[in-house]
Image (cartoon, helix red, strand yellow):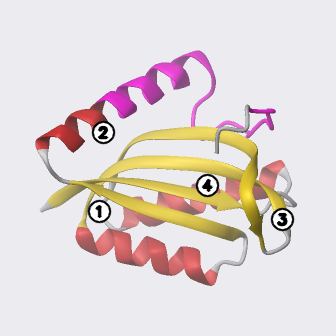
């Protein structure tokens, strides 16, 4: 049975654009190899962290929205934990109808933004974002 998920991750700010894009592609491929169907990706760019993590004050944020069997989450989380470029991550499972409606709205919004900005495979451009995180 497939479930709806959100995977937020924070990468080290010291990575160059090519390395950031390689990590995003790595996550995408890991998810797809384990049966996930990616619905949207949100590129949040480099932002200030709420608190220092491993002596970093900033980090590159990205979010995947996808449907997958439960086993896919375990595998992608294992891969994130053994890769030192990821300084933080969080996966969220959406279960009830209210949560699923919210998930669908987010995916729809992200997909509208992608059509006006850049696709997932495009080079990542660092943007200065408001410190919401």
Q: In the rendered image of this protein, does residue 80 appear above or below residue 98?
A: below
Is the residue under label 3 in contact with that under label 2 (CB below 8 Å)? no
Marks 2/3: CA–CA distance: 30 Å
Marks 1/3: CA–CA distance: 34 Å
Residue nearest the viewer, comparing 68 with 47: 47
Res. 56 mark: 3
Instruction: Identify the mark nearer the N-term, 1 or 2.
Output: 1
Kindly report which numbered mark, 2 or 4, lies closer to the viewer in this rendering.
2
Residue at figure coordinates x 54%, y 38% from the top left: 42
Where disc 4 sits, the SS reads: helix
Where's residue 109, x and y in %?
Answer: 42, 24
Kindly report which numbered mark, 1 or 2, lies closer to the viewer in this rendering.
2
Res. 24 mark: 4
Where's residue 52, x and y in %?
Answer: 78, 66
Res. 35 mark: 1
Residue 133 location, quadrant:
top right
Is the residue under label 3 in contact with that under label 1 (CB below 8 Å)? no
Task: Judge left or right: residue 103 versus residue 88.
Answer: left
Residue at figure coordinates x 76%, y 45% from the top left: 46
Q: Residues within 10 Å of mark 3 (few under 14, many from 20)?
A: some
Q: Is residue 109 magenta?
A: yes
Q: Residues within 10 Å of mark 1 (few under 14, many from 20)?
A: some
Instruction: Give the magenta part as a residue range.
Output: 105-129
Kindly report which numbered mark, 4 or 3, lies closer to the viewer in this rendering.
3
Residue position for label 2: 103
């Amino acid at each position: 049975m497939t479930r709806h998920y959100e995977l937020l991750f924070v990468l080290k700010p010291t990575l160059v654009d090519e390395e950031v894009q390689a990590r995003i592609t790595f996550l995408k491929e890991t998810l797809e190899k384990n049966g996930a169907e990616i619905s949207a990706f949100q590129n949040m760019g480099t932002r200030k962290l709420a608190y220092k993590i491993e002596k970093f004050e900033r980090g590159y944020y990205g979010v995947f929205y996808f449907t997958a069997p439960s086993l896919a989450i375990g595998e992608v989380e294992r891969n994130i934990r053994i890769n030192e470029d990821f300084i933080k991550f969080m996966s969220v499972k959406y279960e009830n109808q209210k949560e699923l409606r919210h998930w669908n709205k987010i995916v729809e919004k992200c997909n509208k933004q992608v059509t006006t900005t850049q696709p997932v495979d495009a080079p990542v451009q660092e943007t200065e974002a408001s410190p919401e995180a």
